[in-house]
Amino acid sequence: SGAKPISHSQITRLYSRFTSLDKGENGTLSREDFQRIPELAINPLGDRIINAFFSEGEDQVNFRGFMRTLAHFRPIEDNEKSKDQNGPEPLNSRSNKLHFAFRLYDLDKDDKISRDELLQVLRMMVGVNISDEQLGSIADRTIQEADQDGDCAISFAEFVKVLEKVDVEQKMSIRFLH
Amino acid sequence: MKRMCLFLKFLCDAVHGGRGSYPDFFSLPRCHLPVRRSFHLYHKLPSIVPESCLLILVGLLLGGIIFGAEEKSPPVMNSDVFFLYLLPPIVLDAGYFMPTRLFFENFGTIFWYAVVGTLWNAIGIGISLFGICQISAFGLTDITLLQNLLFGSLISAVDPVAVLAVFENIHVNEQLYILVFGESLLNDAITVVLYNLFKSFCQMRTIQVIDIFAGIANFFIVGIGGVLIGILLGFVAAFTTRFTHKIRVIEPLFVFLYSYLSYITAEMFHLSGIMAITACAMTMNKYVEENVSQKSYTTIKYFMKMLSSVSETLIFIFMGVSTVGKNHEWNWAFVSFTLLFCLIWRALGVFVLTQIINVFRTIPLTFKDQFIIAYGGLRGAICFSLVFLLPPSVFPRKKLFITAVIVVIFFTVFIQGITIRPLVEFLDVKRSNKKQPAVSEEIYNRFFDHVKTGIEDVCGHWGHNFWRDKFKKFDNKYLRRLLIRENQPKSSIVSLYKKLEIKHAIEMAESGMISKVPSSVSLSEYHEGKIKPLSPTEMENMREILTKNLYQIRHRTMSYNRHSLAADANEKQAKEILIRRRHSLRESLRKTNSLSRERPAAANTKRFLSLPKNTKLPEKLRVRNKTSSRVGDSSDSEMDATTTVLNLRPRAGKILREQRLRQQRPPSEFSMEWKNEVDGSQNGQGEQQEPGSLPQPSIGFRQPLLTRPRFGTLSREDLTADHELARPVPPPRLVRQASQGERQRRYLKEYQKP
C-alpha cells in the first residue's frame, strides 16, 4: 500500500523464526512461546512487548499478526516520506510507531497515560535503588513536562509533541527489516 | 633496572587508575572543587586519548631516560619475548571473550577482508613502494622488488592489540567491532605466510612458478593447520575439565596451559600460533564454562584479563623504549610514501572489497561502516616485531625499514587513534539537537531502546542458519555428552531462582500468603494535587538518579572490554528484573487466590502489573513437592526449581491449559475460556488464573529447566457443552536447544490421559 513491500528473503527468515518459536506446531504463537525467548525474559519491558503482539482478547497470534506487529519496526525509507499521500498510512510511519509505543504504556486503552501507568513502566525500567517517593516525583515531573491540558495524564497528542525532537524513526527501526 | 620497574609500575597505575576508579571521585562533596576538577581532567584523558598512546608515551619517556642515563640504546624488545610471552595472553583474552555467534555470522566478510584485503594491501604497498624506489633521486634503488614486497606484507598486518586499545573508546556497533577485530586476528595467518614466503624468496636465487603455488598452498596449511591444532587442544582441555571436580583448585591452570600449548605447538610447526590459540579459546570456552566450578570460572576470567592487561602495557612501553636509540635511518621519501601508501591502499581496499561483499550480505555496510573499518586498520606491535626479525644480511637497509615501521605505527596509533572518535561522531549525521533537556528524555530514550531490543530478540535477529543448526545438533548429540559433566547448574541466577522457589513454596504451604514485595504494590495510591515546579538542582538530581538507575539495554554480545567484565553487571540487572517479574506474577496470584468464587466480577485492575486487564494467560498446572527434593528423579531434580507451588483448592474453577500438542485444536477453544473477573458471562464461574509461564532465561543457565508436573490435587469441573475441558498437559519444557523439544514431546505423550 504505497510502501516498499518487505523483501521475500526477509519474510522467509521471519517465517522460519516464527515456526521455530511455535513449539506446538499449530501455526500460532502463544504468550508462552514468546516467554521462552530468554533474552526477552530479562528485558524490563518484556511482558509489555509480548502483549503488544496479541490483539484485544486474543491469546494466540498467527503469522500475519506477527508480521503486522513487526512491520511497525521497518525503517522508513527516505523516498517513502513523500510518496503516496493518498493511500493508507503505512504501519511503519512515524505516527504509527509512536502509537505503538503509546499502547505499550497505556494498558487500559483509554488513550491516556495516567500517572499510575507511567509509574508502572518506570518501576519496570529502574533498579531497586530508587525509592517510591523518588520515582513518584520523577513520574510527576515527566507528566508535567508533557501535559498541556492539565489533566495530569499524557494523551497521545501530548506524547507526540514531547517526542517531536526525538528521532523515533531511527530508534524504532530494525535495520534488517528492510 | 629496579628503579625502572618501580617507575614503570607507578606510571601504569597512573594511566590505568584514570580508567578504573573514577566513579568514586564523583561522590566527593562539591566543595572539593579543585580536587574534583583535576580528577575530572584525569578521567577525561583516557576517553580522548586511547590508552595505547599513553603507554607508548610512557615508553618513550623511559627510553629517553635510559638513553640519557646510560648513553646507549635501551634494550630493544626481543622478538622472541614478544612472540612467545607477550602476544599469547592478549590473543587468548580476545579469543576467549569473543562473541562466537556474531563472529561466525560474519565469518565470510571477516575472511574476505582478512585474506583478500591483506593480500591487496601487501602487494599494493610493495609494488608502489618499489615504483618509488626506482626513482633514483631518493637514493633507494638498491631495494629490490622482493624486499619491497616483504616490507609491504609486514606493514599491512592490522594489529589486534592496537585495534582493541582504540576501539574501546569509540562505541561502535557490535558488527563493526567484530569485523575489524576478526580481521585483525585472521590476517595473522596471511602475514605469517607472506612474510616467510618473501623472506625465503629473497634468499633464493631463482624463483619458479612452482614456488608461488607452494606459497599459496602454504597459506592454507598454515591457517587451517593452526585452527585444527587449536580446536583439537580445545577439545582435550574441555575433556580434561570434565574430570576435575575433585581438584577444583587447579582448574584454571588447565585452561591456560592448554591454550599456551596450542600456541607453542602451532609455532613449532611453523603454523599460525595466533589462529591456534584463538581457535582453542573459542572451543574451550563453551564446554569449560559448564564444567568448572563458579569460582574457577571467575578466576579464569579475571586472571586472563590481568595477564592481557599486563602484556598490553608491556608491549606498548617496550615499543616506546625501543624507539629511542640508534637503530634508525631516516629517508624522507621512503617513510612518507610508506605512510601515504598504507593509508591509500587501505582505504581503496576496503572500499572496493566492500562493494563486492555487500552483494552477499544481508545487512550491507554503510559508508560510515566502511570508513571505520578503513580508518581503524591500525598497525601495532606485530609489524614492529616482524621488522626486527629481518635478517640484516639479506636486508642491508634494515634500519630504514625499522624507521618507516615506527613512523607508521606511531601515526596510526596516535593520530588515527585519537581522531577516530571525533570523526565517528561527526559522521553520525542524524543527531538530535540538544534542546532544553528534559528529565523525561532519558526515560523515553531508554524506553525505546528496550522496546527495540525486545523486538529484535523476538525476530531472532539472525534467523536460521543451516550450518549452525547442523552444528548444534552435532554438538548436542556427541560433543556435549562427551565433554560436559552432567548435573551442574552453575549460574548464580539459577541458584537464586532455586532459593526463591523453595522460600516461596514453604511460605505458601504454611500460610497461603506470599512475602510482600515492597515496590510494586505501593504504586497504586493516587496522588492528588498540583505538581509543583522543580528547581534546576532538583531536576539535575533527578536526571542523575535516572542515569544511574535505569536498566541498561541488554547487549546481545558483550562488547569486548580489556579492563572489565561486563557480564557481572548485566547479571545483577537480569537478576533484579527476574525477581521483580516473579514477584509481580506471584502478587497477582496471591490476589486471585484470595478472591472467592462468589465474586467473579471483582476486577482487580492492578493485578498483573505488567499485563493489561484482559490478558488471557495460559495457566500452568503445577503442583509441587514442598520439600523440593525428589527422590527418584534423574538429573532433572535440581531443575525443578522453577515450578510454582500451587496447591489448588478443590473448587478451583476451570483449569485450563495451553495446548502444545500434536493434535490440532480449533482456535475458538482458546478464546472462550479466558475471561477475567470482570466479564461475568461465564455462568459466574470464577477464574483461577495462575500466571504460570515463568520467564526462563537461559543466559547463565547451563541447562534447560524442566518443569515437571505432579497431578496430585488436581481437580476439574464439569463444564457445559460448549466449553470443552482442555486436558491438563504438563508445561512445555523450556528448552534452549531444539533437539530437546523432541524429548519433551515424547514426554508429553506419556502424560496425556487417554
Image: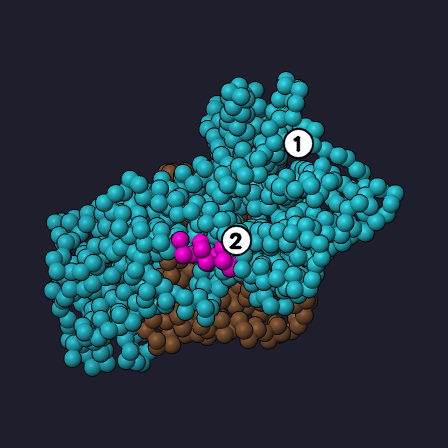
Q: Which residue is mark 1?
A: B323
Q: Position of residue B442 (x, y in %)?
A: 51, 45
Q: Neighbour class for label 1 at 10 Å: few (<14), some, many (≥20)?
A: many
In the image, residue B312 sits, relative to residue A84, either above or below, namely: above
Ranked by sequence position, the earlier of labels 2 and 1 is: 2
Quadrant (top left/top right/bottom left/bottom right) for the C terminus of chain B: bottom left
Residue B28 left/right relative to B515: right
Tag 2, which secondary structure? loop
Residue A20 seen from this side: yes
Q: Colour of chain A?
A: brown
In this view, the mark in front (2 or 1): 2
Q: Which residue is mark 2?
A: B271
Q: Residue at x 18, y 60 (%)?
A: B634
The answer to whether residue B361 is magenta is: no
The answer to whether residue B225 is magenta is: yes
Q: Amino acid at mark 2?
A: Leu
Residue A117 seen from this side: no
Q: Position of residue B267 (x, y in %)?
A: 50, 49
Of residues A97 and B267, the one nearer the viewer is: B267
Q: Position of residue A66 (x, y in %)?
A: 45, 70
Q: Amino acid at mark 1?
A: Thr
Q: Residue at x 81, y 52 (%)?
A: B131
Q: Residue at x 62, y 26 (%)?
A: B74
Residue A104 picture quarter: bottom left
Q: Are marks 2 and 1 in contact (CB under 8 Å)?
A: no
Q: Residue furthest right?
A: B137
Magenta part of the chain? B223-233
Of residues B452 and B65, the one nearer the viewer is: B65
Dot 2 and dot 1 within a common chain? yes
Of residues A17 and B255, the one nearer the viewer is: B255
Q: Colour of chain B?
A: cyan
SS assignment for the magenta stretch, majority: helix
